Structures are given as structure tokens and as C-alpha cells.
Image: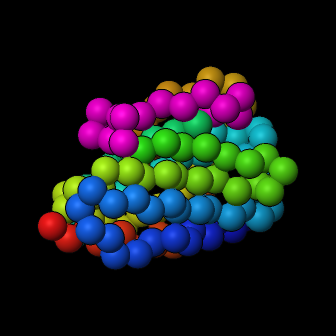
């Protein structure tokens, strides 16, 4: 199982970035996938998850600004981030759990497979 994030970069406040997470040895079609972030000195935070049927759930902190999606054929997970704020600065991770069907739990503790992360820095 390997999850590899990409797309992290520096951006200005109000700008946009798209993160990708390529999965190998892991099917997005049958698993629950999510995006998480961790800023220095803070706990890892769940941002958005998408279940095996494509239904998303968002944290209040990103609702309306971030969009999670996936391409089952490419086995790739995406996070489109718009209206970026300096407080979005963090290392972003994708993660998965082997759960088919509805999943709505944003807690990082229930996700078993993790990528190495990609850094997003937003300046004002």
C-alpha cells in the first residue's frame, strides 16, 4: 500500500491549489479516503473525506472552500483548495481506511494508511 501526495506549494491568500494523492496497492473504489493536515505544534486535523460511493464530508473549517474528489480509474484522490488563508498553512496528508459504503468520521485516529504529506504555505 502506498499513498503519495503531490501539489503542495506556496500560495497567496485568496489563491488556489490542487493536491493529488496517487494510490497504489489500494483501491479508492472500495475504501474511504480523506485529506488531513497538521500545522507545527498542532494536532492532525481531518478536513474532508469521501466514501466509496463518492459522498463527501467536510470539516466546518474548509466547507465551501475545499472540494474533495476522486478518480477511481486513475486511483487518485484530489483536494481542490480555493480562497486560501494563512491559517491553511500546514502539511497535508491523504489517508484511507478499509471501509466500503458510507463513512463520515473525520477523526485521523480511524484511518490506517497514510501518505508522507505535502507542504502548503499560504502568505498574506
**Which residue is depicted at the point 33% across and 60% down?**
15
Give the camera-side residue of 94 and 1: 94
Q: Is residue 107 left or right of residue 31?
A: left
Q: Residue at x 58, y 37 (%)?
A: 50
Question: Can residue 88 be seen here?
Answer: yes
Q: Residue 11's spot in the image, x, y percent?
A: 32, 70
The residues colored magenta run 51-65
Q: Position of residue 109 (x, y in %)?
A: 43, 46
Q: Does the magenta run of residues contain 16?
A: no
Quarter location, residue 23: bottom right
The one nearer the camera, 8 or 32, is 8
Q: How many marks?
A: 0
Residue at left offset 61%, top offset 27% = 55
Q: Residue furthest top?
A: 102
Q: Is residue 67 above or below residue 82?
A: above
Q: Residue 57 location, x and y as percent?
A: 48, 30
Question: Can residue 41 be seen in the rendering of this structure?
Answer: no
Which residue, as the protein is rendered here, is positioned at the far right? 73
Horizontal placement of 9 versus 34: left or right? left
Residue 32, given in percent of the width and then of the height, sits at: 63, 39
Q: Main secondary structure of the magenta part?
A: loop
Residue 33: image quadrant is top right
Task: Describe residue 25's horizontal placement relative to residue 60 as left or right.
Answer: right
Instruction: Say left or right for 13 vs 7.
Output: left
Amino acid at each position: 500500500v502506498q499513498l503519495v501526495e503531490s501539489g503542495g506549494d506556496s500560495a497567496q491568500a485568496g489563491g488556489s491549489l490542487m493536491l493529488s494523492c496517487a494510490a497504489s496497492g489500494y483501491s479508492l473504489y472500495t475504501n474511504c479516503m480523506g485529506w488531513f493536515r497538521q500545522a507545527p505544534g498542532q494536532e492532525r486535523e481531518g478536513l474532508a473525506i469521501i466514501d466509496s460511493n463518492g459522498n463527501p464530508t467536510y470539516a466546518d473549517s474548509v466547507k465551501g472552500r475545499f472540494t474533495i474528489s476522486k478518480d477511481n480509474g486513475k486511483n487518485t484522490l484530489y483536494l481542490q483548495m480555493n480562497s486560501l488563508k494563512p491559517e491553511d498553512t500546514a502539511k497535508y496528508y491523504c489517508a484511507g481506511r478499509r471501509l466500503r459504503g458510507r463513512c463520515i468520521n473525520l477523526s485521523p485516529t480511524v484511518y490506517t494508511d497514510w501518505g508522507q504529506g505535502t507542504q502548503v504555505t499560504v502568505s498574506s
